[in-house]
Amino acid sequence: MRNEPEDLANGDYDLEERQALRRVAGLSTELEDITEVEYRQLRLERVVLVGVWTSGTVIDAENSLQELKLLAETAGSEVLEGLIQRRDRPDPATYIGSGKAAELRDIVAASGADTVICDGELTPGQLRQLEDVVKVKVIDRTALILDIFAQHAKSREGKAQVELAQLQYLLPRLRGWGGNLSRQVGGRAAGGVGIGGRGPGETKIELDRRRIRERMSKLRRQIKEMYTARETKRSRRSSRQVPAVAIAGYTNAGKSSLLNRLTGAGVLVEDALFATLDPTIRKAHTPDGRLFTLADTVGFVRHLPHQLVEAFRSTLEEVADADLILHVVDGSHPDPESQLSAVREVLAEIDGALDVPEVVVINKADAADPVVLARLTMRERHSIVVSARTGSGITELMELIERELPRLDHEVHMLVPYERGDLIARAHEEGEVLSVEHTGDGSVLHARVPGDLYAELDRVAKPVETV
């Protein structure tokens, strides 16, 4: 057992472990044959980025490619070049057209890159034909994001969700070469296996597809079982009528930093995209002492793969079941408005999420341009500016959460016997205690409480006016 400093939080341990092993550039040996790319672990090293600009301004296209660069670096690669092509629509054959694909091949050869990353989701045919031209491994934005999720998932549920998303992506992209297309058994080729061995047989690629479908079915069952456990915990919190607040937002907007600042959770904080994937739920108290829960959800990104949205649906439903959403946006980002739009597009795919009250939390105020902050606060009327790093605006945010949480229905002024001190404790946890006065006959409680606690108090306590 290693000796660890006592002042390190849980997130510091995770960060130390993540940084313990780093790739050394230039020491890899790539295969000359790229045909087995789907069956090898995705390894990004020296990459060239390619984007197709179909709409919007050139600044939008450059911002999208800059985000792809951050994704590639998060996955552990070294970006050598970034290219953008202006087209009405991606080429159906090679994504960028045959002429540009030939130019890309020359750039890849000159730079010594071993991977091309395309800023979009490519069809299986586009991947195959572009690889045939550039002669190196080609992956798309979806595969890159899935690889990052696979690296960072830690919990059993998170790993199962990521694996399911990867298999959904891989299934239509399976290919067969040479022996992979041969029959397993059949006719004279069966090698004299006897009765039962004759027939058309099954190709290797069909066998792979069947195994993937079986694995996907097993993962769906596991996720469903884990969803039941999550739903049980959620219903238990709901039965106690503890308000729930969900933190949602773009990746690297500072959601985990905000959770740490509000609750001292100590979760991993790293300046990287999708640094934390597993949802974290912590208890917190409003300034008046009322208990509520804070849930940190997975980060969003432009064009988040639909396989991930589907696989992480049980996790994302934490947002739909919340009483309030803290929508965190990076105020120092070059285009924070696009971050807001991208998150709301994903939330629209979750039933009931858009009906939950939302507060836009503009984070990183210490690094943001005041003009941008003023523009965002004018655009988003229900917003607040904070800095999770310095603590600026956190007090005002807690006061805002207190005002936005649903109010308690019942106000009580009762004499509670001393032997039922548990009800006083529940009032502190679940309600809003205005005052407690201890007398010779019991404790006089003045509080606002939820309905089930009110029913229990009404059964065992006496109204103060009758004493």
Image: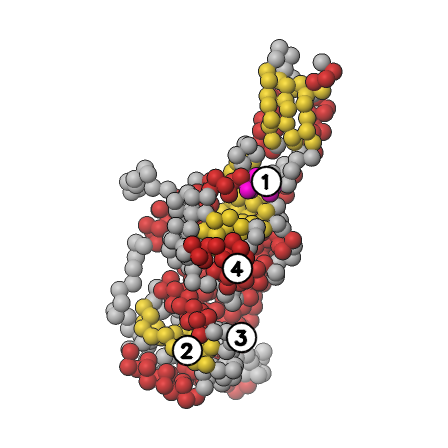
Quarter-of-image position of residue 218: bottom right
The mark that comes first in sequence, 1 or 2, is 2
Q: Is residue 67 left or right of residue 29?
A: right
Query: Is the magenta region chiefly helix, strand or loop?
Result: helix
Camera-side residue: 402 or 29? Answer: 402
Q: Are marks 1 and 3 in contact (CB under 8 Å)?
A: no
Q: Residue 291 versus residue 122: which sits nearer the camera?
A: 291
User: Dot 4 lies on which element?
Assistant: helix
What label does residue 172 carry, if any?
A: 3
- Residue of label 4: 340
Dot 3 falls on a residue whose secondary structure is helix
Three-letter residue code for mark 2: Ile
Q: Which amino acid lies under the numbered mark 3 shown in the image of this protein?
A: Pro
State the CA–CA distance, disc 1 to disc 3.
50 Å
At a point 33% along the width and 80% down the height, the residue shown is 108
Q: Which mark is residue 84?
A: 2
Magenta segment includes 15? no
Mark 1 vs mark 3: in front: 1
Distance, label 4 to label 2, CA atoms, is 24 Å
Distance (Cα) linking label 3 and label 4 = 32 Å
Which comes sooner in the sequence, label 3 or label 2? Answer: 2
Q: Of callouts 4 and 2, which one flags the residue occurring earlier in the amino acid sequence?
A: 2
Q: Residues within 10 Å of mark 3 (few under 14, many from 20)?
A: few
Circle on res. 403: 1
Q: Position of residue 424 (x, y in %)?
A: 60, 24
